[in-house]
Amino acid sequence: MSNLPFVQVTRSVLIVATSLTLPTFRCLAQNVSSDPPYSIVDRGPFYRVLRRTVAVTNSVTGEISQQVQSYTDLEDGMHYLSNNIWVEDICSFCR
């Protein structure tokens, strides 16, 4: 029972520290409008790169900046080459 007050004090210190640091990071940048959809910007036989640009505002200064977000999808046999262009492979038995 003698360790119980120490555990309670430790927990309250952690909660206070967490509540002080999280709002600071959250208010530095915030989306201005709804996010636009991703567009395919590159393709290959086993991948595609999707990208979008999002307007972000700094809540401290009010400055609006553009942030580029992208990700790469990987899949075996995703595209095939047709007339020197990578085309999405849609197989009829996959549905």
Image (cartoon, grey):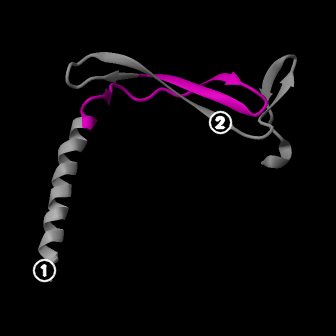
Mark 2 = which residue? 73
Q: Residue at x 25, y 43 (%)?
A: 22
Crowdedness of circle 1 by 10 Å Cα count: few (<14), some, many (20+)?
few
Image quarter of the N terminus: bottom left
Tell me if 81 is positioned left or right of 42 in this view. right
Q: Residue at x 22, y 40 (%)?
A: 23
- For this orientation, the residue located farthest to the bottom is 1
Crowdedness of circle 2 by 10 Å Cα count: few (<14), some, many (20+)?
few
- Alpha carbons under labels 2 and 1: distance apart: 55 Å
**Label 1: element kind:** loop
Location of residue 54 with respect to 24 vertically, above or below: above
Mark 1 = which residue? 2
Q: Position of residue 65 (x, y in %)?
A: 35, 17
Give the magenta part as a residue range: 25-54
Task: Compare residues 18 and 54 and report the one nearer the observer.
Answer: 18
Q: Which mark is residue 27?
A: none
Please tell me in which quadrant of the rendered image residue 5 appears.
bottom left
Q: Position of residue 87 (x, y in %)?
A: 79, 26
Location of residue 86 with respect to 89 vertically, above or below: above
Q: Residue at x 87, y 17 (%)?
A: 83
